C-alpha cells in the first residue's frame, strides 16, 4: 500500500530554514545600521552602495522565503493530500 507524501518533513525543514534566515537577516540589519551610523564616513561611495545592495538582496531573499513557506503551508496545504508516492 503506498504511503501518503510526508508533508510535515518538507514544511518543517522550510520553516527551520526561514527562522535561521530571519536570524541572519536581523544580524545583517544590525551590521548595516552600525556601519551607516559609525563607520560610513571612512568608506567611499562604492562601499556604501555595496552595503546597501547586500542589504536589499538579503531583504529580497527573505521575502521570497516567506512567500515560499506561505504558499506551501497556508495556500496549498491540502493540495497534496490525495497524492501518493510509490515505494
Image (tube, grey):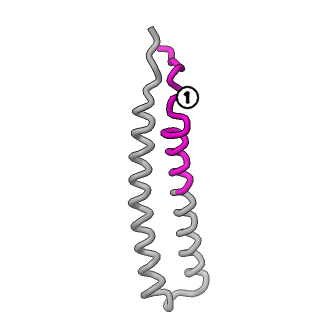
- Front-most of 47 and 85? 85
- Crowding at dot 1, Cα within 10 Å, few <14 / some 14-19 / many 20+, comes out as few
| Residue shown at the point (52%, 51%) measured from the top left | 65
- Front-most of 1 and 38? 1
Left or right: where 32 falls relative to 54: left
**Residue 7 x, y percent position in the rendering:** 45, 30
Q: Which residue is mark 1?
A: 79
| Residue shown at the point (54%, 56%) measured from the top left | 63
| Residue shown at the point (53%, 26%) measured from the top left | 80
Please count the marks in the image: 1
Q: Is residue 67 magenta?
A: yes
**Residue 45 x, y percent position in the rendering:** 60, 85
What residue occupies the far top of the structure in this picture?
1
> Tag 1, which secondary structure?
loop
Residue 22, above or below 42: above
Q: Is residue 51 magenta?
A: no
**Residue 50 x, y percent position in the rendering:** 58, 75
State which region is magenta: 63-87
Left or right: where 32 falls relative to 71: left
Left or right: where 44 falls relative to 10: right
What residue occupies the far bottom of the structure in this picture?
41
**Residue 15 x, y percent position in the rendering:** 42, 45
Give the position of the N terminus as an image quadrant: top left
- Front-most of 43 and 19? 19
| Residue shown at the point (52%, 38%) measured from the top left | 72
Amino acid at each position: 500500500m503506498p504511503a501518503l507524501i510526508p508533508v510535515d518533513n518538507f514544511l518543517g525543514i522550510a520553516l527551520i530554514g526561514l527562522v535561521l534566515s530571519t536570524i541572519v537577516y536581523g544580524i545583517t540589519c544590525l551590521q548595516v545600521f552600525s556601519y551607516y551610523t559609525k563607520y560610513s564616513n571612512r568608506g567611499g561611495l562604492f562601499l556604501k552602495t555595496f552595503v546597501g545592495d547586500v542589504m536589499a538582496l538579503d531583504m529580497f531573499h527573505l521575502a521570497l522565503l516567506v512567500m515560499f513557506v506561505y504558499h506551501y503551508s497556508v495556500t496549498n496545504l491540502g493540495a497534496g493530500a490525495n497524492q501518493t508516492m510509490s515505494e
